[in-house]
Amino acid sequence: MIIELAQVSRWYGNVVAVNDVTMTVGPGVTGLLGPNGAGKSTLLHMMAGFLAPSTGTATLDGTPIWRNHEIYRSIGLVPEREGVYGFLTGWQFVLSSARLHRLPSPEDAAAKALAMVEMEAAKDRRIETYSKGMRQRVKVAAALVHEPRVLLLDEPFNGMDPRQRLHLMDLVRELGAAGRTILFSSHILEEVERVAQQIEVLVAGRHAASGDFREIRRRMTDRPHLYHVRSSDDRRLAAALIADASSGAVSLGKAGLEVQAVDFRRFTWLLPRVARDAGVTVWELSPADEDLESVFSYLISGSAR
């Protein structure tokens, strides 16, 4: 099944959460990558039919998603926010989901879903006693109980220990390989590239980039990098760096140098050699723009497209 978004926006008053996004998600595993607050949850909820687009259209195999109850036979959603009742056991929670879908054998479906996420041993415990990772897994079981052809997961690996994370990653890959359409969100590139064949990048509500993880990583690595440098002679080092094309801009201040490296690989090779030849000792070299917002925001610029 194919989800298509065409010029979709969603705003709350004067706040624009998603801005003019066009995207197609088909069979296999797609990762929705972006920093916290990028609009990933809003986008997933529109795909699941829980939010109406303010403008644009969201369709599933050409059929509008909003106010179409039939799509819930085909879609499973795992929200980031807790949507479980602590007084229920894991078994009761997943079984209630099976009954809401009016499955012919809800008990068998619930047992199968719990086995898929390795929660059989804890199924009779109340959910309020579960760890964060266990609650995540029981939410996944409830979303899988009707065997949906489309699975939407919002930060599904949060709170899981390494073994739980690896198991869920394997499960997601298996479901995608079986032909299901799976979209999961994350703010961690390494997490996405281990699971997804296709990556969609969302920054500040805008669709910033699309491609496989090799292409996305190349764009992130090839962007200009900003470094803070302190040395025994900042002025002499600045003059030497400016002479090379790998340094796009060099500014000298009381706290040291700020250097924009437009050619990351050449700059990292060049700096120690320039410092040696100039007789300068480098005391500190630290990235000044390595936060996720800075890295992802570069992908929005025209130079990244």
Image: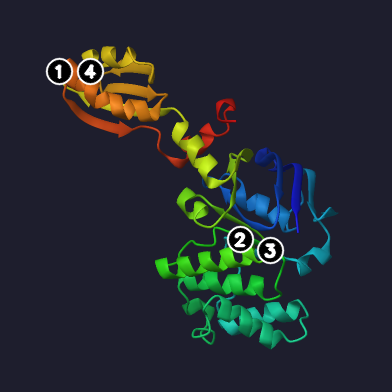
Image: 290 above or below 161: above
Looking at the image, tell me whether mark 4 or mark 1 is earlier in sequence order.
Answer: 4
Determine whether label 3 and label 4 are within 8 Å by CB: no
Residue shown at 61% from the left, 68% from the top: 83
Q: CA distance from mark 4 to mark 2?
A: 49 Å
Picture coordinates of residue 240 (x, y %)?
27, 14
Query: 19 or 189, which lies in front?
Result: 189
**Residue 254 falls in which quadrant of the image?**
top left
Element marked by disc 2: strand
Q: Residue 258 location, x and y as percent? A: 33, 23
Q: Check disc 3 and report the residue beneath it.
A: 179
For the residue pair 239 and 85, the one nearer the viewer reads as 239
Q: Quadrant of residue 20?
A: top right
- Of marks 2 and 3, the one in the foreground: 3
- Whether residue 216 is visible to the viewer of this picture, yes or no, is yes
- Label 1 and label 3: CA atoms lie apart by 61 Å
Q: Is residue 271 left or right of residue 128?
A: left
Numbered mark located on residue 153 in the image: 2
> Can you identify the residue that label 1 sits on?
279
Inspect the image, locate mark 1, and give the three-letter code of the amino acid beneath it. Answer: Gly
In the figure, is residue 115 to the left or right of 101? Answer: left
The crowd level at tag 4 (other Cα within 10 Å; few <14, some 14-19, many 20+) is: many
Q: Earlier in the sequence, mark 2 or mark 3?
A: 2
Horizontal and vertical percent for residue 250? 35, 17
Dot 1: within a 10 Å radius of its alpha carbon, few (fewer than 14), some, or many (20 or more) residues? few
Name the element at disc 4. helix
Question: How many marks overall?
Answer: 4
Q: Amino acid at mark 2?
A: Leu
Quarter assignment of residue 238: top left
